[in-house]
Amino acid sequence: MLHQADFLFHGALNDFLPQTSRHTLLRYTFRDAPAVKDAIEAIGVPHPEVEVALVNDVPVTLLHPLRPHDQVALFPAGPEYTWPAGYALKARTPPEIKFVLDVHLGKLARLLRMLGFDTCYENHYADKTIARIAEQDNRMVLTRDVGLLKQKIIEWGHWLRSQQPGEQLAEVIHYYELAGKFRPFERCMACNGKITQVSKAAILDKLPPKTKMYFNEFFQCLCCKRIYWKGSHYERMQQFVVQLQQQ
Ligand SMILES: [Zn+2]
């Protein structure tokens, strides 16, 4: 027998719906008693983007079985909403801010690392690998692929609305409220390793002649051994970080 329930998606969750279905009551038809998670993902909304689910005005988990005539309201994560204790499905972020990025997000990975955020990225990761890393290491998934976020084992994740790396970075900072949490230039942009100060003498033979002449302070990645110094590139990045902090 077929049953029906009504769904109302709030705020940014409407980004996942077709234009004509946004901000309106959606009638969902089902058999048996599917979990709320299955229903919302069939409608198009990936579960990690949902912060609060109410069924008939009562907060529920996404495993809650749907019943005929239920009124379901879903709210997104993000700084726009605050909730009484017991409403949110989970903390907005894991205890430590750590990311794993989908393939094709290499530029965003470098920017997040520049700000000091632990960011796992390889351009050959399969969806299953990304989901497994997210689960094992409590990492937040960032992706342009809604389908990836529907993987059951992903707890934290965000679908990037923008396709432009600078805008994506601003979006992530806003969404996870990271503005006060930057630790710029502590992490290698190439490999995510930690950077530490190193004496000039120790790496002298690896420096280009002009760098050798004009700079005395050096840093090195503990993983890939890449060397950093505060050249013109550093100055530009520092300006960029200051701009981000002011946004
Ligand atoms: Zn490195």
Image (spheres, rainbow, N blue to C red):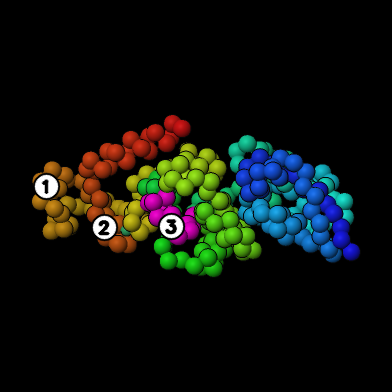
Q: Is residue 100 magenta?
A: yes
Q: Residue at x 77, y 47 (%)?
A: 26
For marks 3 and 1, the one nearer the N-term is 3
Query: What's the CA distance linking mark 3 and mark 2?
Result: 23 Å
Which residue in the protein does label 3 denote?
104
Q: Please, what is the three-letter code of the amino acid marked with disc 2?
A: Arg
From which residue to which does the magenta span run? 99-110
Q: Please state which of residues 131 and 20 is positioned toward the viewer in this rendering.
A: 20
Judge whether 54 appears above or below 120 on screen: above
Give percent across and percent down for residue 166: 42, 43
Which residue in the protein does label 2 denote?
226
Q: Residue at x 75, y 44 (%)?
A: 8
Q: Is residue 153 magenta?
A: no
For marks 3 and 2, the one nearer the N-term is 3
Residue 57 shown left or right of residue 118 in the figure:
right
| Extreme residue in the top direction | 246
Labels 3, 1: front one:
3
Q: Please, what is the three-letter code of the amino acid marked with disc 1?
A: Lys
Q: Please, what is the three-letter code of the amino acid marked with disc 3?
A: His
Please tell me the numbered disc located at residue 139: none
Secondary structure under badge 1?
Answer: helix
Answer whether labels 3 and 1 touch (C-beta < 8 Å).
no
For marks 1 and 2, the one nearer the N-term is 1
Query: What's the CA distance linking mark 1 and mark 2?
Result: 17 Å
Give percent across and percent down for residue 15: 62, 45
Would residue 105 be seen by someone viewing this image from the given angle? yes
Q: Is ligand 1 within 8 Å of the beta carbon of the residue shown at mark 2? A: yes
Q: Residue at x 69, y 51 (%)?
A: 89
Residue 17 shown left or right of residue 95 in the figure:
right
